[in-house]
Image: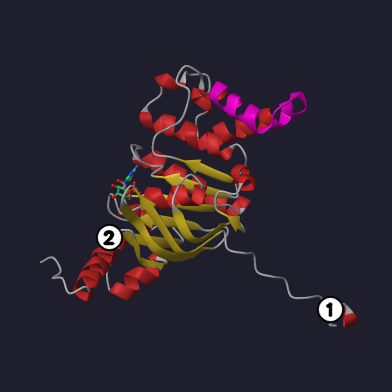
Amino acid sequence: MMNYDSGGTHPPPQPPPPAIEARGLTVVRGDRTVLRGLDFTLEPGTITGLLGPSGCGKTTLMRAVAGTQAKVTGTLTVLGHPAGAPLLRPRIGYVTQAPSVYTDLTVRQNLDYFAAVLHPGRAHRETRRTAVTRAIEDVDLTSHADAPAGALSGGQRSRVSLAVALLSTPDLLVLDEPTVGLDPVLRRDLWDLFHRLAADRGATLLISSHVMDEAERCHRLLLMREGRILAEDTPEALRTRTGTETVEAAFLHLVDEAAATQGKEPRP
Ligand SMILES: Nc1ncnc2c1ncn2[C@@H]1O[C@H](COP(=O)(O)OP(=O)(O)OP(=O)(O)O)[C@@H](O)[C@H]1O
């Protein structure tokens, strides 16, 4: 038997397991196969952008990772466990496109409510207070903390949803188009927050977007089309590989290339 302690040596540290690992991931919705045998890996502490045209399957993929999607086949491992495992619930923050907040409660009351679900009991009162204050600060809503959520703009309401997701300090954040409807300053501030969450808290983020210029802010990109992954790489590698200046041009190049491979004519 090998004795790792002899000579004072220790086994080399194991690299952390992937945050998400998908092999042959397939999802059927209604009578359509909307995800078709996806293979990809997300490393912990990274930001991955999920890009592709409307209807290509981004939300379906996020629902599968969050464990809310039926008819998922293949292998999908999230933080070392099968997607949907109950113990993953407090470790994943999933923010859908439709903000889920109580419009008759203030921002702080919304967060107090969700914090009470996460950390119930008088003993956790201080933990709740700290978590709520930090989450409100994270999304830059301190000046609106006592405003009813119903009186906020759409973008502000989505930030309340994001704050709810941050309450449990999740290891994985799955964000479906979090910057829709936000002005450029807020978009920049949110992207700064995403990078702080990855760098300082080691969180892994999977973020969908239609906005190709946001792709440049991601460590890696998953480009999707018609339920398949067209490419998975860093923004820079995608631009270099396709000889293009922007991720948008790289995406269009890859679409044309795929069409040509399938024997279809690329767009003029
Ligand atoms: N409830 C449903 N039943 C059957 N098919 C559905 C259902 N929801 C979505 N689909 C189909 O699944 C496919 C993928 O949808 P999905 O919402 O994942 O796309 P998306 O890339 O997130 O689109 P968008 O960018 O517009 O949000 C679409 O073709 C859609 O028509």
Identify the mark nearer the N-term, 2 or 1.
Answer: 1
Q: Residues within 10 Å of mark 1 (few under 14, many from 20)?
A: few
The residue stretch that appears in magenta: 109-127
In the image, what residue type sits under mark 2? Glu
Q: Nearer the viewer, residue 80 or 254?
A: 80
Residue topped by disc 1: 4
Residue topped by disc 2: 248
The numbered disc on residue 221 is none
Is residue 250 rendered magenta in the image?
Answer: no
Question: Can residue 210 be seen here?
Answer: no
Where residue 156 appears, as percent x and y from the top left, is 42, 30
Q: Secondary structure at mark 1?
A: loop
- The number of numbered discs placed on residues in the rendered structure image is 2
Question: Can residue 72 be seen here?
Answer: yes
Q: How is the image coloured?
A: secondary structure
Q: Nearer the viewer, residue 53 or 138?
A: 53
Q: Which residue lies most toward the front here?
A: 31
Name the residue: 53% across, 35% down: 163
- To which quarter of the image does residue 72 belong? bottom left
Is the residue 258 above or below the residue 183 in the image? below
Is the residue 230 above or below the residue 79 in the image? below
* Quadrant in which the C terminus appears: bottom left
In the image, what residue type sits under mark 1? Tyr
Q: Nearer the viewer, residue 12 or 188?
A: 12
Q: Report the mark closest to the observer, 2 or 1.
A: 1
Where residue 143 appears, as percent x and y from the top left, is 50, 25
Where residue 198 appears, as percent x and y from the top left, is 56, 53
Where residue 172 appears, as percent x and y from the top left, is 56, 50
